[in-house]
Image (cartoon, grey):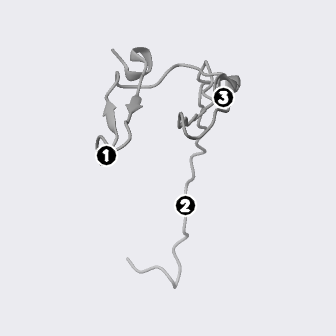
Amino acid sequence: MPPIDAGAVHETTDWPFAFEVAVTDVGAPGATPGTAAADATDATPVPAEFVAFTVNVYEVPFVRPATVHEVVEEVHVNEPGLEVTV
């Protein structure tokens, strides 16, 4: 299955003085097919003594537009002359 279809979930949990490094569970490989920027409004401010909360919002288009490359064929011609040796 391509990574785009699998989705991705990454949750990081840490407790005060429990570990020197936060524990991160690995989610599914890939990425979500689309995300709205309004997801950042889900987190509300709370006193710092209780919770530390980080919100990362990435806007990803729901579709991938087709990419087209037009290549013009170039022909290099150098007429024989004094500057060309054979």
**Quadrant of the image containing the N terminus:** top left
Front residue of 7/17: it is: 17
Nearest-to-viewer mark from 3 and 1? 1
Q: Position of residue 50 (x, y in %)?
A: 54, 34
- Location of residue 28 in the rendering, given as x and y in whole percent from the top left corner: 34, 21
Q: Between marks 2 and 3, how big is the CA–CA gap?
A: 55 Å
Labels 3 & 1 near each other (Cβ < 8 A) = no
Which residue occupies 28% across, 43% down?
Answer: 19
| Foreground: disc 2 or disc 3 | 3
Q: Residue at x 41, y 80 (%)?
A: 85
Residue type at numbered disc 3: Ala
First-in-chain label (2 vs 3): 3
Q: Nearer the viewer, residue 45 or 73?
A: 45
- Of the numbered discs in the image, which one, if any, rests on residue 21? 1
Using a 10 Å C-alpha cutoff, classify the residue at mark 3 as few (fewer than 14 neighbours), some (14 to 19) or many (20 or more): few
Where residue 18 appears, as percent x and y from the top left, is 30, 40
Where residue 60 sits in the image (x, y, percent)?
60, 27
The residue to which callout 2 is attached is: 76
Disc with the residue nearer the chain's start (1 vs 2) = 1
- Picture residue at 67% right of the left edge, 27% below the top: 44
Q: Secondary structure at mark 1?
A: loop
Q: Above or below — where is 47 with respect to 65?
A: below
Residue type at numbered disc 1: Val
Residue 38 located left or right of residue 12: right
Disc nearest the viewer among 1 and 2:
1
Horizontal side of 24 relative to 57 (left or right) equals left
Query: Helix, strand, or loop for circle 3?
Result: helix
Residue named by callout 3: 40
Question: In this rendering, is residue 54 above or below 64?
Answer: below
Name above or below for residue 76 compared with residue 52.
Answer: below
Rendered image quadrant of residue 37: top right
